[in-house]
Amino acid sequence: MPIIEAVLLTLFSLLLGHLLTKDSGAADRRRQFRSKLDVLLAQLHDTNSGLIFTFHRETSVTIRDECAKIRGDICWVRRRRLDEAAHQYYCLEDNEEASQDKNGRIYFPGRERVQELLRRIRDCAQ
């Protein structure tokens, strides 16, 4: 009987170690994903307003690839939100015209939309 208990305890320990290591890898990938999105948000902040949709075009493939890497590491509810936000990001069009705010400054509404979608995508990887 003690031999069976020892074998079962060993198998349980191995399984638990595997699950903890697997979860750690997923957590690391999600953390790296959020860091990459934070870098893109910082770059967006520094991007000239007239170049927002150039920024969007240049980052669309990166976003698609990075989302694909972590898709399996997030729960199904967040995965669905990630898919929706990423799809909206891919489908943005660069036909928005410049507007003026209440202080008379010219801005492109696309900046806020791109920023909002990047944040939504990032937050799915919590």
Image (tube, helix red, strand yellow):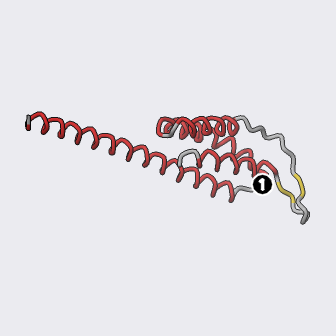
Give the image location of residue 60, x and y in percent: 64, 39
Q: Secondary structure at mark 1?
A: helix
Residue nearest the observer in this picture, 15 or 21: 15
Residue nearest the observer in this picture, 94 or 67: 67
Please name the residue shown 23% across and 39% down the image: 12
Please name the residue shown 8% across and 38% down the image: 2
In the orientation shown, which residue stands out farthest toward the front? 1
Q: Name the side, left or right, on which 27 lies relative to 60.
A: left
| Vertical position of residue 83 compared to residue 108: above or below | above
**Mark 1: amino acid:** Ser
Q: Quadrant of residue 44?
A: bottom right
The residue that label 1 is drawn on is: 49
Give the image location of residue 46, x and y in percent: 68, 59
Circle count: 1
Give the image location of residue 91, x and y in percent: 72, 35
Residue nearest the observer in this picture, 4 or 61: 4
Q: Name the side, left or right, on which 60 lies relative to 4.
A: right
Q: Quadrant of residue 18?
A: top left
Please name the residue shown 47% across and 39% down the image: 73
Please name the residue shown 86% across and 58% down the image: 106
Residue nearest the observer in this picture, 88 or 24: 24
In the orientation shown, which residue stands out farthest toward the bottom? 103
Check the picture and name the quadrant holding the N terminus. Answer: top left
Q: Local crowd at mark 1 within 10 Å, few (<14), some, or many (≥20)?
A: some
| Vertical position of residue 110 compared to residue 73: above or below | below
Give the image location of residue 75, x and y in percent: 51, 38
